[in-house]
Amino acid sequence: MRALFEPRLVNDAFGDPGLYVDFRDERRALLFDLGDITVLPPRKLMRLSHVFVTHTHMDHFSGFDHLLRVVLGRKAGIVLVGGPDFMAQVEHKLRAYTWNVVHRYEVELVLDVREIGTDGRGRRATFSSRRRFERESAAPFEVIDDVLHDETTFRVRGRLVDHEMPCLAYAVEEKAHVKVGKDRLASLGLSTGSWLRELKQAVLTGAPGETPIRVQWRDRHGEHLITRPMSELRHLVLDVVPGQRIGYVTDLRCTESNVRTLSQLLPGVDLLFIESVFLDEDREHAARKNHLTARQAGEIARRVGAKAIVPFHFSPRYEGRSDGVVAEAQAAWAGAPASLRPAPG
Ligand SMILES: [Zn+2]
Ligand SMILES: [Zn+2]
């Protein structure tokens, strides 16, 4: 199934956590976490419309300066989303620099910063390069059903989990996925063309059934043009199936309440990126550090009903042993028999 977006970890499993979600047919992307992002070339950073930060430990937020430096003077705007106190933390970052020339840059950069409080409410402020990145408050927003961002084709939901501090876990959800029945197309004597994109767009954006679609194509008999209502074409050539859902979960403690929160946010998620910082033999250390072991990550993924998992955010102490960390997470996710698991300590 060709999904709307393609998620990829920014760094390897030992590097700073981060997920780059590229939209296949648009010059556009989302980023989850803002640690070391120097491997992303400027053209990829320029594509970002939204950056979602889980929490502001350095490995998740120190890349803010790099991003700002790349987009400043070139990009018109970017939305940054984070947890409690996020607006103040972005403001502190901006205050650390002297802005005596940026107001003259031809392209104005506006940072649209949104934070989710522990009360579940959304607050917003903007910072413009034209006004030396002074904080300007904007209207607060309501968070309904955990939705932090909503567009016609996808949404991003988020919930706070416990990392001895509030930390956001995220879900990226494609609303519906549309497939073209190529064989049916041929049997109707039609061929592909820009009209298919128009039809898909009409279906995905919930346009009324009577919306006329101009079906235009060319073959050896010449140019053809017919106009049919969307509702008719949709059933003839398209299959609409539920969209792809991705989870991005890092950093958190292994607690029942976190598992419950994730089960509500990510039930049956297609692909779950989940931190697996330590091996289960080091589980006491993991608990002290407020992180999961690979086995705990796998068990959480299984309880959430994840269809596939990608463990990441490994401690450097396992450098050279990443296969073992992955295997432990995968085994717990697959529900390996207890006899194959390390004995509980
Ligand atoms: Zn952390
Ligand atoms: Zn971390």
Image: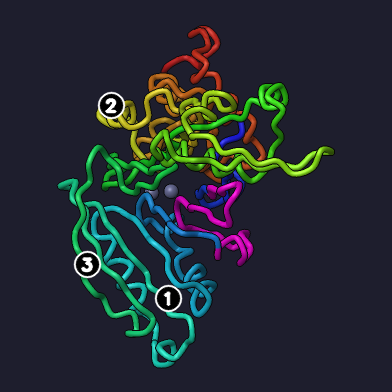
Q: Secondary structure at mark 1?
A: loop
In the displayed structure, 125 sits above or below 183; it is: below
- Residue 329 appears in the picture as rendered: no
Q: Residue at 53% x, 41% y: name it.
A: 213
Disc 2 target residue: 260
Question: Does any atom of ligand 2 lie closer than 8 Å to the CB of label 1?
Answer: no
Q: Secondary structure at mark 2?
A: helix
Distance of label 3 from label 1 (alpha carbons): 16 Å
* Left-right relation of 94 to 216: left
Q: Work out which quarter of the rendered image holds the C terminus and state it.
A: top left
Q: Amino acid at mark 3?
A: Ala
Specify few, some or many for label 1: CA neighbours under 10 Å numbering under 14, 14-19, or 20 or more. Answer: many
Specify few, some or many for label 3: CA neighbours under 10 Å numbering under 14, 14-19, or 20 or more. Answer: few
Q: Which mark is residue 138?
A: 3
* Left-right relation of 213 to 345: right
Residue 340: percent from left, percent from top: 55, 11
* Left-right relation of 29 to 161: right
In the displayed structure, 343 sits above or below 287; it is: above
Residue 97: percent from left, percent from top: 39, 83
Q: Amino acid at mark 2?
A: Arg
Q: Earlier in the sequence, mark 2 or mark 3?
A: 3
Residue 244: percent from left, percent from top: 49, 32
CB atoms at circles 2 and 1 under 8 Å apart?
A: no
Q: Earlier in the sequence, mark 2 or mark 1?
A: 1
Magenta highlight range: 20-46
* Left-right relation of 213 to 256: right
Tell whether position 343 is magenta.
no
Q: Amino acid at mark 1?
A: Leu
Q: Work out which quarter of the rendered image holds the N terminus and state it.
A: top right
Disc 1 target residue: 109
Foreground disc of the pair 2, 1: 1
Question: Does any atom of ligand 1 lie closer than 8 Å to the CB of label 2?
Answer: no
